[in-house]
Image (tube, grey):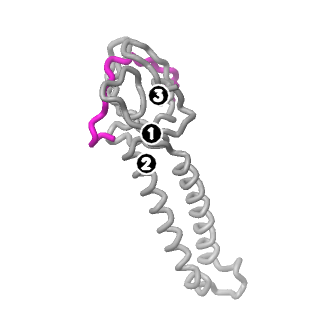
Amino acid sequence: MSNFESTTRRTTTRAGYERALARLNEARLRYLAVCSSNEEAAGAGDSSVWHDNFAYEENQRQMHALAARIRELASVLAALEVVETPRAPTVVGVGCAVRLADPEGDAERRIVLGGWDDSDPEVGRVAINSPLGQSIMGASVGETRTCPSPRGPQEWEIVAIERAAEDEL
């Protein structure tokens, strides 16, 4: 089985792995900042009863939410597998730049298929586990794939597949 045959594997690019690691590190820093303000929050209340102290309760809520986020990010990071995109890909996979056309000829777009949970609409990167990413994964030039969208099913024809440039990943 090639790297492009399954979206259940949590594959990503090297750059995608680095972004996931940065998200985890940022969440850890935010968690430590909240923890360090615990004492200040505990002293901010009007009452000696902790549950009457909104600042302390909010601090605890943030701390627990960030701890859950850290566990989630660490789990994703541990499951990520960095893959190399072939120099001349023949099927859509992680790290590919894909030109898609509406079969009616009304619309055309170019996307870069990022790894697991690695999307950024502003730069045209779509995650492999997104609806569009899942629908085009493994497709070849000339194939038409249907993608679910908020406006209903949308068809896209694969017009071109190439290795994405390093600065797009």
Residue located 30% across and 29% down the image: 87
Q: Residues within 10 Å of mark 3 (few under 14, many from 20)?
A: some
Residue located 47% across and 68% down the image: 29
Q: Which residue is the site of mark 2?
A: 17
As measured in the structure, the alpha-carbon distance from the residue carrying label 3 to the one carrying label 2 is 17 Å
Identify which amino acid the numbered label 1 is placed on. Answer: Gly
Q: Is residue 79 left or right of residue 137?
A: right
**SS at mark 3?**
loop
Q: Residues within 10 Å of mark 1 (few under 14, many from 20)?
A: many
Q: Is residue 165 magenta?
A: yes
Q: Which residue is the site of mark 3?
A: 4
Q: Are marks 2 and 1 in contact (CB under 8 Å)?
A: yes
Identify which amino acid the numbered label 3 is placed on. Answer: Phe
As measured in the structure, the alpha-carbon distance from the residue carrying label 2 to the one carrying label 1 is 8 Å
As measured in the structure, the alpha-carbon distance from the residue carrying label 1 to the one carrying label 3 is 11 Å
Q: Quadrant of residue 104?
A: top left
Front in this rendered view, residue 40 or 168: 168
Q: Position of residue 146 (x, y in %)?
A: 49, 19
Q: Indicate which disc residue 115 carries.
A: 1
Identify which amino acid the numbered label 2 is placed on. Answer: Tyr
